[in-house]
Amino acid sequence: MPMIKNLVFDFGKVLVNHDLHAVLERYFKGDKETEECFCTILASPAFTQACDLGLVPFGELIRKAQFEHPQFAGAFRFFYENYLDEVTGEIEGMREVLVCYKSKGFKLYGLSNWSDVIYEVMRQYEIFNLLDGRVISCEEHIVKPEKEIYLRLCERYGLEPSECLFTDDRMENVEGAKAAGMEAVLFTTVADYAKDLEKLLKALQHL
């Protein structure tokens, strides 16, 4: 059985937290019903995939959404101007996990679905400096859980899929990694994840 040499991490809800409500409540000021309607648009597969694919710049997608949903033109503008506030910080304890495994000789990589605003996020949080490389959907124009994006990471950095362990907070992306030949684990909490990761690596005769 191949040894795991590379740990691959999703970004959102794994390395950094994000809270859309924390941003939007400042705009809607307690109007929960209208906020929920707006969130439904933001969370729609059409909008999220367009953002993550990166075929159109994020700002242009916002302008298109304002045209298609004029009743929310102001909300879209506020969302765009305050987007970085949605990312509320590093997931507490994850930097220590990464430092620990990096010190053991593991290579660390990022694999995330995100729009082109991710670059500013990465500049703000030091946890991203621990990564030895990364693949982001907006650069590749492919999104998880498509098999190709996992293999793109391996091709770019000369990795064997069977030597990679992928972590994500969404089960469909975990399954996508497995379909690409990686080991994978679902992230829930840092405490549970640290135990699950250690247990899995021990089972694979690493620790």
Image (spheres, helix red, strand yellow):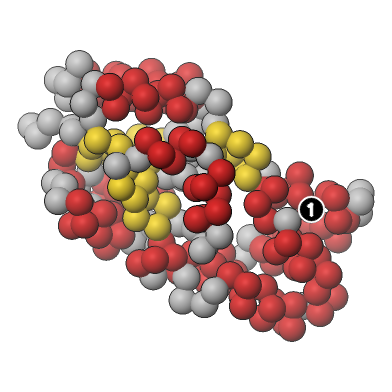
Residue 60 to residue 82: above or below: below
123 or 194: which is nearer to us?
123
| Quarter residue 87 falls in | top right
Where residue 146 appears, as percent x and y from the top left, is: 33, 61
Q: Is residue 178 visible from the viewing direction of this image?
A: yes
Give 119 or 176, whichever is nearer the viewer: 119
Please provide percent x and percent y for residue 91: 54, 31
Of 128 and 163, which appears nearest the observer? Answer: 128
Instruction: Name the spot of residue 149 as percent of width and height, x first.
Output: 30, 60
193 w.r.t. 13: above or below:
above
Q: Is residue 14 depicted above or below 64 in this figure? A: above
Structural crowding at the residue carrying mark 1, measured as other residues with C-alpha within 10 Å and reported as few (<14), some (14–19) or many (≥20): many
Q: Quadrant of the N terminus?
A: top left
- Identity of the amino acid at label 1? Leu
Q: Quadrant of the C terminus?
A: top left
Q: Quadrant of residue 69?
A: bottom right
The residue lying at 51 percent from left, 26 percent from top is: 189
Farthest residue toward the bottom? Answer: 67
Identify the residue at the far left of this view.
Answer: 1
Q: Which residue is mark 1?
A: 24
Q: Secondary structure at mark 1?
A: helix
The picture places residue 192, in percent across and down from the top left corner, at: 45, 21
Residue shown at the point (31%, 19%) measured from the top left: 198
* Residue at 34% across, 50% down: 134
Q: Is residue 175 visible?
A: no
Q: Quadrant of residue 106?
A: top left
Identified at 52% across, 55% down, the residue is 118
Q: Is residue 58 above or below residue 174?
A: below
Residue most toward the right? 30
